[in-house]
Image (cartoon, rainbow, N blue to C red):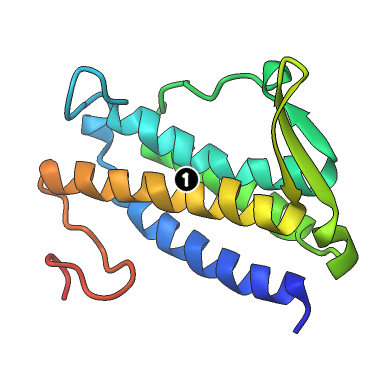
Amino acid sequence: MALKDALLAEYDHEMATTRKLLERIPGDKLTWKPHDRSRSLGGLAQHIAHLPSWGTLILDLREVDLASIPSSTAEAESPTAVLGLFEEARAKTRKALDRTDAELAGMWSLKREGQEIFSMPKAAAFRSFVLSHIVHHRGQLSVYLRLIDIPVPPIYGPSADEG
């Protein structure tokens, strides 16, 4: 199996699961926070919706310097806007995954103001910086939803709300 086929299967699965959670976001709770130091529900959702766009940065470029990337700390305008951002980023990145194994094995570096933070093959960077990052924040979002009494959908099997 080509590396891209394995990545596409994983990507499609994780994006479908992420969409299920984003679809549950209530418009009247976008500013809700579980703690003063936490992101708002809308801010977290916006961040999750934006994360697939890092896929194109990893797949299309050899390096990215965080100093040149605008922060994604914007608050969500509405659940519909969050889903639109997510769908646009998801589709663009899925198309960008059409790479050869050699391209996916090419090195990618993350820098901050010229200082290298890490370098790894593009496939590994994609899994870490896109897929694992989304899964991490999706876990946070599922807790946020539970705390405001929104049923959590099944993720890797039945949830306590929807067994």
Quarter of the picture containing the C terminus is bottom left
Q: Is residue 100 visible?
A: no
Identify which residue, 106 or 76, lies in the foreground.
106
- Residue 25 falls in image quadrant: top left
Residue at (53, 25) in percent of width and height: 72
- Residue 30 falls in image quadrant: top left
Q: Is residue 94 toward the left or the right of residue 96 in the image?
A: left
Residue at (37, 49) in percent of width and height: 138
Tell me where residue 84 appears, x and y as whole percent.
53, 43
Identify which residue, 39 or 115, lies in the foreground.
115
Q: Secondary structure at mark 1?
A: helix
Tell me where residue 21 appears, x and y as whole percent.
34, 54
116, above or below 60, in the image: above
Tell me where residue 121 appears, x and y as whole percent.
76, 53
The furthest residue to the bottom? 1
Quarter of the picture containing the N terminus is bottom right
Q: Is residue 65 toward the left or the right of residue 37 in the image?
A: right
Q: Is residue 60 visible?
A: yes
Residue at (78, 44) in percent of width and height: 108
- Circle 1 sits on which residue? 83
Circle 1 Cα neighbour tier, 10 Å, few/some/many (<14 / 14–19 / ≥20):
some
Which three-letter amino acid code belongs to the residue tagged 1? Leu
